Image: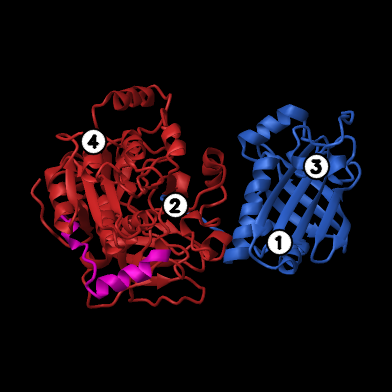
Amino acid sequence: MRALTWQGKHDVRVETVPDPEILNPRDVIIRITSTAICGSDLHLYDHTIPGMKDGDILGHEFMGEVVETGSSDHKLKVGERVVVPFVIACGGCFFCKKQQFAACDNSNPAETADASEIAYGYPMAAAFGYSHLTGGYAGGQAEYARVPFADVGPIVVPDGIDDDKVLFLSDILPTGWMAAVNCDIEPGDTVAVWGCGPVGLFAVQSALLLGAHRVIAIDHHPRRLQLARNLGAEIIDFEQVQVREALAEMTGGIGPDACIDAVGMESHGFTPDNLLDHVKVKTFMATDRVHALRQVILATRKGGRVSIPGVYGGVADKFPIGALMEKGLTIKSGQTHVQKFMPQLLQMILDDKLDTTFLISHRLDLEDAALGYKNFKEKQNEYTKVVLKPGSGIQTRH
Amino acid sequence: MARRTRPDPISDSPESTAKDPNPAAAGLMASEDEDTLIGRTVTINRPARELYEFWRDLRNLPLFMENIESITVIDARRSHWKVKGPADSSVEWDSLITEDIPGELIAWESAEGTSVPNSGRIEFRASDNGRGTVVTATIAYDPPAGALGKMFAKMFQREPKIQARRDLRRFKQLMETGEISTSAPVEVFP
């Protein structure tokens, strides 16, 4: 089959690789009809996440048609259309029973689980196409994918509905939703969202659906800010405005009740702390640049909530622990428990209460995936979301 | 090695978590040679009886223990173990079940004269907070050829502590999910 493979920093290529096979009874194989490039794929593209091997197949946002099932008693049938959660979860361990699917104890193979146990204290769950720290499972930017524990993860979607409407159930929609849920929004609340990438925009949309009085979105790309405004947010361009002062003024001096860091470790900005971070990362004195998170913690009102869907992997320097403690903030974070949120979000899409297609800026054939990566990284204003369609024959000018 | 002496411990944690663990204090009938003690606890969301019975049928152990070449059951208490060692070597010994409480505990020790004296215990305790069964493996052993042997073993990822951790993960996967998780890619050059 054809698949997008990682070959090193800023080097991804579509190559012919062996087709996936059923390895365990609960596996299924799906033929992929749509798959997206995620902002977190850029961490792999930039090689800021370790544990990659040449030839790894990327992609953790995908959907398609079941073409083969393993020997166990499957609820999925050949021919059904499914969206696959990026988190691989067994459904039977303590964590899955608590619906903390992103903490599944069993999906990360015994050998690869050591790395995260050493780094984080306990082994992390597995994910598709996301380095060998999370299991080394082949991803979905391909024609076919093997899906383990298929009786727990994939959700069946009705035949009539277009891929573009449901594809984002695989990651970014539940991630934006959980980010807003983690804000514990109360009536009258103002929620500020740092980063208007896909997760930030879905967090804006979700916070409003969950009853936020106001949402203020922060970015510097005009098109992304416009999309946030279209959803009903007020906006701040951090290149033109002093963000903390603006937020205080816009909230009557109280500050936002809840703040969402939808930026993660790639945060931009030419402030002294950020430049110092850059030096420390380059010299391995720290791994994660946390400029946005520092600003989030300082901007949140006393007694407020901080939600961190943005991805971090290592350790940070100059973390404002004093502001966190003295103001009495509550922090919630984590990889998304996708399986927990999928059914209600699918229902909202089917009921036309939620539309996610506004995000898609480009549709490419899988063959043009490398171009999609390059442009998603370099032209962030224009490329808000790239969806790849294997075998579609869509022609793109190079 | 002579047994260490130290003040009576006051912590409630298992002996294997001590900075200087003592196999005898862990309740193992260890010989003087067995100077290394490892312990690992996992919670498995299945009944203790089911886990005990699966483990007690020693023929099941190679399903999740990676370094075992074979286990031959001799009689109700005795079995013969053949285990992979460093660099294509293998180590063999007879093992004797010294204690067997159905649904709760299996303890064993190697027969006299083995090159790798070892003893151990696997305990299955129903959790008191509804989380299934708390499974604790405790193993005392004398590393082959001392520190050098241990270093070689580590290079080949067969260092017993790493091995025990991975074996218990696989046991848990098999019991909770019915299969052992793998991301093994299809071989390009079979």
Chain A drawn in what color? red
Mark 3 falls on what kind of element? strand
Question: Does the magenta stretch mainly form a helix, a strand or a loop?
Answer: helix
* Magenta-tinted stretch: A340-362
- Disc 4 and disc 2 on one polypeptide chain: no
Above or below residue B50? Residue A327 is above
Q: Quote the CA–CA distance across marks 1 and 2.
A: 42 Å
Question: From the viewer's perspective, is B93 left or right of A381?
Answer: right
Q: Which residue is mark 1?
A: B127
Question: From the viewer's perspective, is B146 left or right of A147?
Answer: right
Residue at position x 27%, y 63% from top? A209
Residue A140: tell me if it is visible: no
Q: Which residue is mark 2?
A: B187
Indicate which label's residue lies in the foreground, 3 or 1: 1
Chain that bears disc 2: B
Q: Quote the CA–CA distance across marks 1 and 4.
A: 52 Å
Tell me the kind of residue under disc 1.
Ser
**Which numbered disc covers residue B140?**
3
Chain that bears disc 4: A
Indicate which label's residue lies in the foreground, 1 or 2: 1
Tell me the kind of residue under disc 2.
Glu
